[in-house]
Amino acid sequence: MQAHVNANAVNHETIVIRFVGDSGDGVQLLGEQLTITAALSGRDVRTLPDFPAEIRAPAGTIGGVSGFQLAMADQAIFTAGESLDVLVALNPAALKHSLQYLNQGGLLILNEDNFTDKDWQRAGVSSDLLTQVAGEYQILHVPLVRQTLEAVAHLDLTHPQAKKTKNFYVLGLVLWLFDLSTEHCLAFIHKKFNHHKTIGEANEAALLAGYNYAMTLELAKQHYAMGELGRPQGNYRQITGIEAVGLAMATLAVRMQTPVLVAGYPITPASGILQEAARLKDYGVKLFQSEDEIAAIGVCLGAAFGGTLALTVTSGPGFDLKSETLGLAVITELPLVVVDVQRAGASTGLPTKTGQSDLRQALYGRHGEAPLPVIAAKSPADCFDTILEAFCLAVRYMTPVVVLLDAYLANAAEPWKMPNPEDVPIPLIEYNRFTKPYQRDEHLARSWNKPGTAGFIHQIGGLEKQGDEGRVSYDAENHQQMVTLRAEKINGIAKDYPPLEIEGDPNASILLLSWGSTYGAVRSAVSQSMEAGVSVALIHLRYLNPLPRELGDLLARYQRILVVELNTGQLCQLLRAQYLVNAESVSQCNGQSFSVSRLVAIIQESRLNE
Amino acid sequence: MNNQYTRRDFENANEIRWCPGCGDYAILAALQRLLPELGLAPEKHVFVSGIGCAGRLPYYMNAYGFHTIHGRATAIATGLKAMHDDLTVWVITGDGDALSIGANHLIHCLRRNVNVNILLFNNQIYGLTKGQFSPTSQKGQITKTSPQGVSNEPMNPLTLALAAGASFVARAVDKDPAHLVQVLKKAYEHPGCSFVEIYQDCNIFNHGAFDPFALKENRPAQTLLLEEGEPLVFGPQRDSALVLQADTFAIAPYDPATAHIHQANHFVGAMRLAQLQFPDYPVPLGVYYQNLRENYTLTTDSTTQSMEDLRQLYASRTSWEQS
């Protein structure tokens, strides 16, 4: 059978492929190896492991679908793509789950052996699904299980072992399709299965069999072949936001040669950071899995009182529970960092889906007047820098800091040029600067006086403080002064910001404004619009509190300001209130990232309406 | 005994704001009497408290202090002690703070065996908020929020602590400071999480709640001092004892042959003692239970990894060299 891929399906420089199967099918491993191979061949890559909401749901059912999506291009890209050029579906449930994302004319690779009547039934889908859409796609039926078993028949394997190598068969097939060499994957198999020689040989045989099968079929690979991206030389790795947070903490501990604390209570999608921290014990990252969300921030605050750098990680519902302790951290002016991996929805909502609806909570979600810095990472690799910067701010200004990430950033991956750990900025810690705990420096930061030190004994707490000694005060005038002082301290942080960068065409009349993970889609939309001859400017905000000082003046330059965010317009409303500008909200709350095409269309429309 | 420090070393100039006559004064005094004896400098002690009248205590000690928020002192102290094992950490809490809003943290602090000393000031009332019933208020107790009397059973702090896996459980009363100091000293010396329930008189909202057994003249007949390896004897003439009948304690005339011997490492024995109800039985005071087990700490292994290890860590997943 030969697949003639329709030319109009592939007339773009980015190729997006998705593998979908059961949780146990090994699609994550397959995706990772394809990613490295593509990166090594000089393509830019973005990946998105799309894990099931129900962990290990029954095999073959919609709930048990596990996927891995990879976008590759011979130019810089910023998202893992929104529609698919190639879909590999290992069973009917997987097909049902992802077929809607496949472009018209796209290539659909099916595991024929798992599309029996029984498989359709288990998925609760009628086999008519395939018949109905047969004309819309290029469909390749591969007898995957049979072919894999044949390929490894000469080896001494049990049936399940033999069957398990099928993901490498798929990998081989896809490598050929994308004109990628088998070299890296063979080396990987060799290394990984060093202690299980037979399994290694089986995977190797399966990989080559898949590769040769595709070659024999003469799959239309020319449509997927692409040039190389001029990525700077250096050592790279693919990094998810979760991994980046873990590595930032390890970097802090090793650089300071002092343990740091990571505390949390398991919650999707932040739990991944706890698991990452558990692996980093030898690097000085101490993990505390707490009895609840409140305890997690509590132990961080206790550790911080003692002079330790501490991070607590959570997601929406857990962030609610941390509010009271955050207020205590504000009034006691102790440094700590809270990461909120935002997810969609009020209450439990959509735990595995993404959103940016916790912005207001981060900015205002505490009683009384309790200002604190809020910063957001824009990409998976940027999570590394953002965490380190959060600690620098926390220590320099003696304040808790909230870092907003989201489900997309946590799990999506991009290439990260690994820095020299000696060059990354870390906080400069100086304990016991002044004898009185609330004596302040030029930044209005108080002295971090460490318990255990003679001459620095003090008592702090949640009651209002007065003067340098931090004594309890019920005085009316003092409270007014302290409210003002704490606000001034936080506002002063903006003086250290680097100047705002305007991407796209700074002289355009339309400005797109984004924050957080939305950057990828917005940046792509700006590039595409500019290529299509539509001028547009882009400002991406890293600092959400305090806002950059020049922002108001910059906003005033543009006729139209579109604030793009995955909520109902939280930043937009804030900008309107703060700067009295006619900012317009581009909002989305469906649990998914913005699609580039939607943003391009919005930009186009805005220009027409000028 | 180290006499380097005196009581004055642990006092400060802060104005004490408890009501005159409050039992908290006696507990503060007991601490200021004990701490010089321990031989540690004031800066090595940290007092962490929650919310409630007891929560003010750290302000009145010349030691590091953290007056936190309602119910969270045990959690905050856990983080401090886990990362800073060199500090001696005292948790000051009350019946509402530890057993209602903060009960979950208390249970887990005991279970983990964090090496802190938890002093629960039990006055069976919410004093700071001016007189509502607490989780240890007695059934039938009239308070501002139970004008018809409290309708449900009180919580038993000692059985809770024991069930949670506490490695040191003791009880004392504010009215017997000498004994209180002894118990606090044992709590300090215990290498693990120490839990001490201190009956404390709120002389404004629940005055005299413990007088029937806590007053000096009532103590000989109505309390029983627990001593390791000694019989459970009480009474003005030390002529009554607890004897084990079937599975429960009964009161009998003291006879060395039948009187039960207190063994603090005996969990079931401690549970039996903790369940005794006054006035049917005298109130046992002292160390109910003690066993030695591993402490929770995060500071045992230090950071030894180098920059080179860090570089290798960076490259440990999905990495490549772009040429």
Image: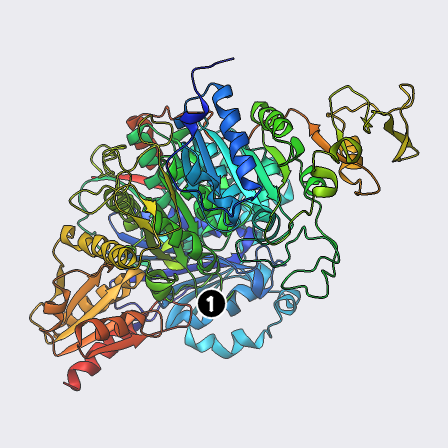
Q: Secondary structure at mark 1?
A: helix
Is there any visible trace of residue A29 in the rendered image? no
* Three-letter residue code for mark 1: Ser
- Residue B86 location, x and y as percent? 44, 25
Q: Which residue is mark 1?
A: A98
User: Where is B30 relative to A610, above or below?
Assistant: above
- Dividing the picture into quadrants, the one containing residue B172 is top right
Q: Residues within 10 Å of mark 1 (few under 14, many from 20)?
A: some
Q: Which residue is at 53% across, 41% downward?
A: B74
> Percent position (x, y) of residue B161?
67, 39
Q: How many marks?
A: 1
Q: Chain of mark 1?
A: A
Please name whichever residue, B218 or A173, is drawn nearer the observer in this view of the structure.
B218
Q: Is residue A597 left or right of residue B64?
A: left
Q: Position of residue A422 (x, y in %)?
A: 22, 32
Which residue shows up at 58% across the image and 35% down it?
Answer: B112
Seen from the viewer's position, the closer of residues B79 and A422 is B79
Q: Position of residue A268 (x, y in %)?
A: 49, 55
- Residue B65 vs residue A342, the one in the foreground: B65
Which quadrant would residue B6 be assigned to in this image?
A: top left
- The image shows residue A135, relative to residue B28, as above or below, that is below
Q: Quadrant of the C terminus of chain A?
A: bottom left
B31 on left or right of A484: right
Q: Answer whether residue A174 is visible to the viewer in this image.
A: yes
